[in-house]
Amino acid sequence: MLNIFRRKSEANIVAPLDGEAIDISQVEDEVFSQKMLGDGIAIKPTSGVVVAPCNGKVIQVFPTNHAIGIKSNEGLEILIHLGLDTVELKGEGFKRLVNQGDKVKAGDKLVELDMDFLSKHAKSLVTPIVITNGAEVKSMEKFLGTVVRGETMVMKINK
């Protein structure tokens, strides 16, 4: 009835990769830049270790290991899409370290990337990090620039 008793929650999302965080609108893929899957940021990676951006549960690992879905303890659904058009690589270049249903903490390793292979065969290594259940988001603050995986906050979200 009254929403005044509803508890607000805040979620801090840390960088899942080392590199440079850019706004999602700068990604050279309309599905992401037009926010068709949701709002967020993207990272131009400089290393090949991908970590959990928050505490939560792995809710989806694509069969080709090119994307992972995580549901944060606050209820946010986060898609980490490793590179652009990387589904076409059929899993090559990705070493998955987690499975659907696994609980993770911010900074836990999720995937290792073969950066040499991917830089030669992927369209782009730019990695979108998208909040796919945006209806849950009241406000989102983005932090862009140089980021360190598991440490640098890239998004502060109020639900």
Image (cartoon, rainbow, N blue to C red):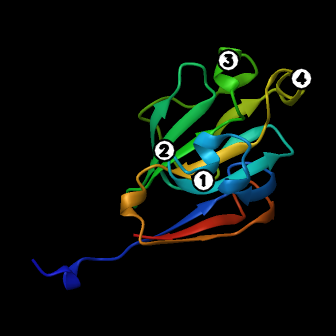
Label 2, on which residue?
A: 70
- The quadrant in which the N terminus is found is bottom left
Q: Position of residue 138 (x, y in %)?
A: 41, 72
Q: What's the CA distance linking mark 4 and mark 2?
A: 28 Å
Label 1 amino acid? Pro
Label 1, on which residue?
A: 53
Which residue: 81% across, 65% down? 145
Q: Please tell me which of labels 4 and 1 falls first in the chain.
A: 1
Determine whether the residue tagged by mark 2 lies in a helix, strand or loop. strand
> On screen, 130 above or below 135?
above
10 Å crowding of disc 4: few (<14), some (14-19), many (20+): few
Residue 153: quarter of image: bottom right
Q: What's the CA distance linking mark 2 and mark 1?
A: 9 Å
Image check: 53 left or right of 95? Answer: left
Label 4 amino acid? Lys
Q: What's the CA distance linking mark 1 and mark 3?
A: 25 Å
Label 4, on which residue?
A: 120
Question: Would you say the residues marked 4 and 1 are in contact, meaning their CB atoms lie under 8 Å apart?
Answer: no
